[in-house]
Amino acid sequence: MADFTGRVVLVTGAGKGTGRDMAQAFAAHGANLAINDLTPVNLDQTEAGIRAAGGQVKAYIVDVTKKMPIQGLVKTVLDDWERIDILVNCAQVKPPASLLDMDDWDWQRTLDVNLTGVFLLMQSVARIMRAQGGGSMLTIGPHSHADPKQAAFTVSKAALVELSAQARQEFAAYGIQVHLLNPDEATDIVRLALTLCE
């Protein structure tokens, strides 16, 4: 069984879905959890669940699309936990619209959350991990098929393939592992995440 005792894991999008599952799994294996989301009620539920199971957790309400709030998030996590060993990028939005019907606000918001937010988090956390001597980064990647009703989501997720490849190449020299998790290839994406970070 994986043992993450003493390691600090920052999970974005932890209020529900895969983000919540990731946070709960790492906590169940001994990690200290820094959980992030933009919706307090959802994040409160994740935090309460982890605490009820005996886990160590702190919640941070931050919009991951903005550089200054992200830098503030990273600083606060360091103040609270002193390090960040694993970053799990799960924050995402998925507006149900085709290219012909999509509002430009939905398009931009999707790119901001699903792509720019990941870039900003990778950049800020990698600087911490470089100083620590290493770490791991996980990002939920694209499905293998494009959905015409989720155009912006599909495009943003596809771009994560190249972003992760670039980060993997640049960060390797600092002992930072970068993994892009493909939902179509993993029967248990949470178990895969734990295995990659052991």
Image (cartoon, rainbow, N blue to C red):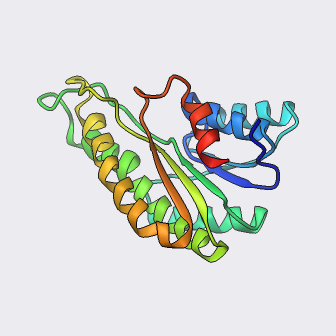
Closer to the camera in the image, 137 or 156:
137
User: In the image, residue 134 lies at what x, y percent?
Assistant: 61, 67
- The answer to whether residue 15 shows anywhere in this view is no
User: In the image, residue 140 lies at what x, y percent?
Assistant: 45, 40
Is residue 70 positioned above or below 41 on the image?
A: below
Q: Quadrant of residue 2?
A: top right
Give the side of residue 134 with respect to residue 99, left or right.
right
| Quadrant placement of the N terminus | top right
User: In the image, residue 36 lies at what x, y percent?
Assistant: 61, 47
User: In the image, residue 152 lies at what x, y percent?
Assistant: 25, 37
Q: Quadrant of residue 184?
A: top left
Give the side of residue 108 with respect to residue 114, left or right.
left
Is residue 38 positioned above or below 118 on the image?
A: above
Look at 40% across and 39% down and name the residue there. 141
Look at 85% across and 31% down and name the residue there. 53
Closer to the camera in the image, 194 or 13:
194
Look at 78% across and 44% down and name the residue there. 3
Q: In the rendered picture of this protein, how many numbered marks are placed on residues?
A: 0
Give the side of residue 34 with respect to residue 185, left or right.
right
Is residue 101 positioned above or below 90 on the image?
A: above
- The answer to whether residue 197 shows anywhere in this view is yes
